[in-house]
Amino acid sequence: MDIQNFLEEFKDIDLEQLDREKQENFRSILFNNGLFEDALELSRIIYEQNKEEDDAIEGYVHNLMYLDKKDDALLILYNAEKTAPVLYLEGMIYKNDGLLEIAEDKFQQARSKTKHPEAIRSIDSELVSIYLETGRENKAKIMSERIFHEEPSAESFHLAFDNLFVMGLFEDAVDFYTRHGREYEDANLLFAVAYSYNQLKDIENSKMYLLKTIALDSEFVDSYLHLGHMSKGEEAKKYLEKYIELQGVAHSAYLHLISLYNDDKEYDKIRQLVKEVLTNMGISEETLYIAIYALKTLFEYDKIYSLYNEHAIIKDDPILLGAALNALSEEEDYIDFVEEEAVTYFEVLHDEPTYLETLKNVYELTGSKRVHEIIEHFEHHHHHGCSHDHHDEY
């Protein structure tokens, strides 16, 4: 039955007379079709008829929270018997509001009122994240490891490992993995171990775990990016090409690969890459930046000039505008054009790190008085660095 017909019939139904299962089914249909107010009315009826039941309270409160009716939700919980699920819901609302002390107290109370392992684990996970947010790292660490030891499972292992990882305790994370993680290995975990080793400056182990990651999941895109950045020559090219083939979009992969091709004088490969980037990934700030960088490497200034005139977005983006004019300022044929643009777009380029270098290139070739004035402005007001690193960090 489609939703329109359902709603026609729904209008004539006395919802209070339906049995609980039908009420819940109807509520799901309404909710899944975005009819949240109607679903809320049903939740209210279920609640009014079953005020003692945690399920009825939970359903109503979730519905209210979904519609941002937080005060109504808290009132329902305030009037309910303080069971573990009710206290847990109160804790979640206060936690989302940033009232962490009250939330912690509610979770502690909830914990003392339940024996269910699942419920205890959910509560403890929330407590761990409160400890992390309030700077009690050690407490978070002890608790998340205890959760794991009480009930070793992939889920509790990941919780404990992720907490060590998030806290930046990379040595502890690697150690915890080495002691307990072998049977819970998946590609995400291996990648996180590789990252941890990288943070510990242990490049050899980092690389080994990246290789293990792709052995387990040959399409784990980010592994190829980092393997590429850690490798040299042909090996680096192979990984970066694979990363791009898997539709990876990090700037740094393209820029690194272009410079590797350039080192080996593989200029056609650079041209091919530019073509692929602009056709497969479309025109965007990112793809134009890569194209300008590549064409500058090839000294193909005429193509940069064409891109500049074809794509208005270059002039709206300080980084792109800076990169394009900086490249063109290396070629005498375009120097008058660059002078005009560099002066015209002073406001856009003002904070762009390559701007000063571009102005100096222009001044060197033209001796232009107005360009000299802008350079003077910078030398007096700024001590601007001239490098612009567009690489993504590992």
Image (cartoon, grey):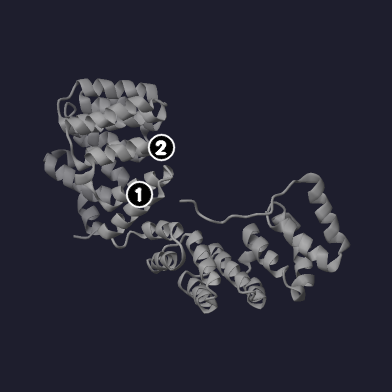
Q: Is residue 298 above or below residue 178?
A: below
Q: Position of residue 128 (x, y in %)?
A: 32, 30
Q: Is residue 252 above or below residue 133?
A: below
Q: Position of residue 392 (x, y in %)?
A: 50, 54
Visible in this render: residue 71? no
| Residue 168: mark in rendering | 2
- The amino acid marked with disc number 1 is Asn
**Badge 1: residue crowd in 10 Å (few <14, some 14–19, many ≥20):** some
Q: Nearer the viewer, residue 361 or 28?
A: 361
Q: Nearer the viewer, residue 229 or 362?
A: 229
Quadrant in which residue 243 is drawn: bottom left
Measuring 45% from the left and 72% from the top, which residue is drawn there? 280
Q: Position of residue 228 (x, y in %)?
A: 43, 61
Q: Are marks 1 and 2 in contact (CB under 8 Å)?
A: no
User: According to the image, label 1 marks what residue?
Assistant: 205
Visible in this render: residue 153? yes
| Image mark count | 2
Q: Position of residue 224 (x, y in %)?
A: 38, 60
**Badge 2: residue crowd in 10 Å (few <14, some 14–19, many ≥20):** few
Quadrant in which residue 47 is drawn: top left
Q: Secondary structure at mark 2?
A: loop
Check the picture and name the quadrant holding the N terminus: bottom left
Q: Secondary structure at mark 1?
A: helix
Q: CA distance from mark 1 to mark 2?
A: 18 Å
- The amino acid marked with disc number 2 is Gly
Measuring 26% from the left and 44% from the top, which residue is drawn there? 39
Q: Is residue 308 above or below residue 158?
A: below
| Residue 279: mark in rendering | none
